[in-house]
Image (tube, rainbow, N blue to C red):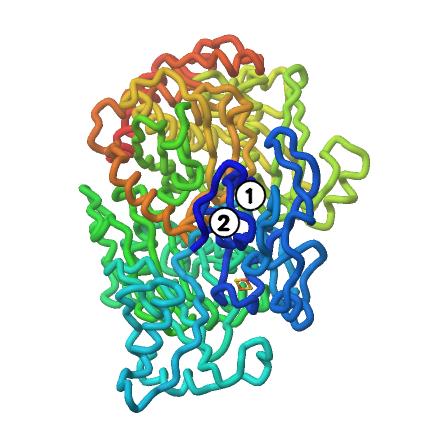
Amino acid sequence: MNSPANITDPLVLFMPSGKRGRFPVGTPVLDAARQLGVYVESVCGGRATCGRCQIEVQEGNFAKHKIVSSNDHISPKGPKEERYERVRGLPDGRRLSCSATIQGDLVIDVPQDTVINAQVVRKAATDRVIERNAAVQLCYVEVEEPDMHKPLGDLDRLKAALEKDWGWKELLIAPHLIPQIQKILRTTLPDQPEVSPGKWGVTAVVHRDMDSSRPFIIGLYPGLKNEAYGIACDIGSTTIAMHLVSLLSGRIAASSGTSNPQIRFGEDLMSRVSYVMMNPDGREAMTKAVREAVNTLIGKVCDEGAVDRHDIFDCVFVANPIMHHLFLGIDPTELGQAPFALAVSGALQYWAHELDIDVSRGARLYTLPCIAGHVGADAAGATLSEGPYRQDKMMLLVDVGTNAEIVLGNKDRVVAASSPTGPAFEGAEISSGQRAAPGAIERVRIDPETLEPRYHVIGTEQWSDEAGFDEASWKTGVTGICGSAIIEVVAEMYLSGIISEDGVIDGSLAAKSPRIIPNGRTFSYLLREGRQGEPRITVTQNDVRAIQLAKAALYAGVKLLMEKQGAETVDAIRFAGAFGSFIDPKYAMVLGLIPDCDLAEVKAVGNAAGTGALMALLNRDHRREIEREVGRIEKIETALEPHFQQLFIDAMALPNKVDPFPKLSEQVKLPPRKATSETETDAAAPRRRSREERAARRARD
Ligand code: FES
């Protein structure tokens, strides 16, 4: 135990955390870090054999902190550290903080990427630095040899060593390890010269986030084990995404995705629930399919990251409620009908093998809590990632899929709902709609004078009006419109006056432009006359209607939450999910998908659900944080809100019949309001209105 520090003791500042304190000369840097709560990994318990505790001294005059830091202010390498450097190698400037002691004022950098064994560093999947406090810890101990006069069992002596060196009390052990203990303790590894031979050195994998709250030995290895991995997985209806992460360094070893094989049972969530209802073995088949896909994906990320799947000790999963239930083997039928009852809403913990996940035998598995019947653990993950509850500002978080999950709030109060947007935003139900793939139109601009379009196609560098476009686009062809372009083309049609605020294509413009073409009793906009063998790409009146219905459902859900919050405006908008990564926020706002907001405050955040899972994997405090916050989030069921119908009808207009968009108007010239019946007879208008009311009821129910 070091003596208490006084004012003349050296001042030590740790970066990037910024934590600082005074410590007596001779204090090991690792101890100083521990006392300040700075996370520095250690597997060997300070024996200078694992290399996990590396730090760097930053040299210079840090006037702001009143510290002059120098390599002379840290002890020179001692014999243990020199042995480690000789055997394993230390990068230039790196020191082992368990061996190096404080000799003067220091600024210490704790690298976020400590990589042992020179493994390839992959591109980070997320730029965020997540403070580490993983549920899994590797603890090397040297166990006393048996003694005839002290009849304590091998397990008991192992536990005693773990308590003495690491402070673990009341340790439990995974039952499958008990028959293996004696063999593991008596094995010496020839390739570990730094571990003293014959010392009964073993590494225990300790998990400290069990339901019982007692630490659990979930793995045991002879000698020094210096790698432990975890997976963070987001099971979406169409895609399963996974990160493979070192639990010791936080390094992302690999990230990958695969399509959800349940698609063969039904494209969308409700058709999968129907499949379960109509087929006696439907639930089992879908559970098996998704677990197999997860196992295949684990194989893929392990191959990519050069990691043995049996070194995975912790798994965190997020999913929408129906995927969550199917993955866990729960019948999701109740989620298909009001009142949309979840079988379980809280966070869950399993042994990974109980869910057939093929990783280490003792690995644990944690699922984030679900927020409500239609707002799942994926929305909880996105909420953890973006943290509306950590903000002063009113933040709107939307994840647009066939069902939009919406969270709105700030540090005082958070509310959440889902809204049935349908598949139009993904290109389904749109006459020329298609997936985002080479050949799909992804960007559109329309000249308001001539009504001529220009567009950009995935896989072709040039825009359609640039030299070389025709030749360059031959390879992929021009095959349809993907989700981002559907938003843009309808918004551009509105901005150029082709459609009215009610979404009606103005047939009178046919006299001005050959691109306005009759289509039965309505009109279409010709975006592209197909070349040989290519489809003709048009935007029909029905397409515009489908987008209006989808965006009205989303906006009405958002507006309902704003009303619950008593908020006139939102300060920031975050689009989670793939859809949000490709749409231009300006066009989303022109269409009235989202409320008025400073465009600089509208951001796509990618797979925020997956980032939330990663945070919960790397830091168990984040598990408690989201469990607590989900308990505080107020859930709003749009189906039960009579006001939803009126909000939906108002939101059918572009951008909205009643809500102003002053911030948007500062940046985009919105067209003057047009009469609604330019191309519709007055007799047709009531029919249209009653159609909207029916659609609103359908969306609500
Ligand atoms: Fe293991 Fe320092 S703690 S080398």
Q: Which mark is residue 27?
A: none
Neighbour class for label 2 at 10 Å: few (<14), some, many (≥20)? Answer: many
User: In this rendering, is residue 696 above or below 681?
Assistant: below
Neighbour class for label 1 at 10 Å: few (<14), some, many (≥20)? Answer: many
Q: Position of residue 223 (x, y in %)?
A: 49, 78
User: In this rendering, is residue 374 above or below 74?
Assistant: above
Circle 1 is placed at which residue position?
14
Residue at image location 67% in from the left, 58% down from the top: 76
- Badge 1 amino acid: Phe
Residue at image location 38% in from the left, 30% down from the top: 554
Q: Earlier in the sequence, mark 1 or mark 2?
A: 1
Circle 2 is placed at which residue position?
33
Q: Specify whether 336 is left or right of 145.
A: left
User: In this rendering, is residue 250 above or below 688?
Assistant: below
Residue positioned most to the bottom:
148
Q: Specify whether 169 is left or right of 642.
A: right
Residue at image location 46% in from the left, 53% down from the top: 239
Front in this rendered view, residue 697 or 174 = 174
Determine if the C-beta at disc 1 is less than 8 A from ligand 1. Answer: no
Residue 687 in sight from this viewpoint: no
- In three-dimensional space, the C-alpha distance between marks 1 and 2, rounded to whole angstroms, equals 8 Å
Q: Quadrant of ligand 1?
A: bottom right
The C terminus: image quadrant: top left
Q: Specify whether 257 is left or right of 388.
A: right
- Badge 2 amino acid: Ala
Front in this rendered view, residue 480 or 659 = 659
Q: Position of residue 446 (x, y in %)?
A: 63, 23
Front in this rendered view, residue 143 or 341 = 143
Front in this rendered view, residue 265 or 62 = 62
- Identify the secondary structure beneath mark 1: strand
Residue at image location 61% in from the left, 45% down from the top: 104
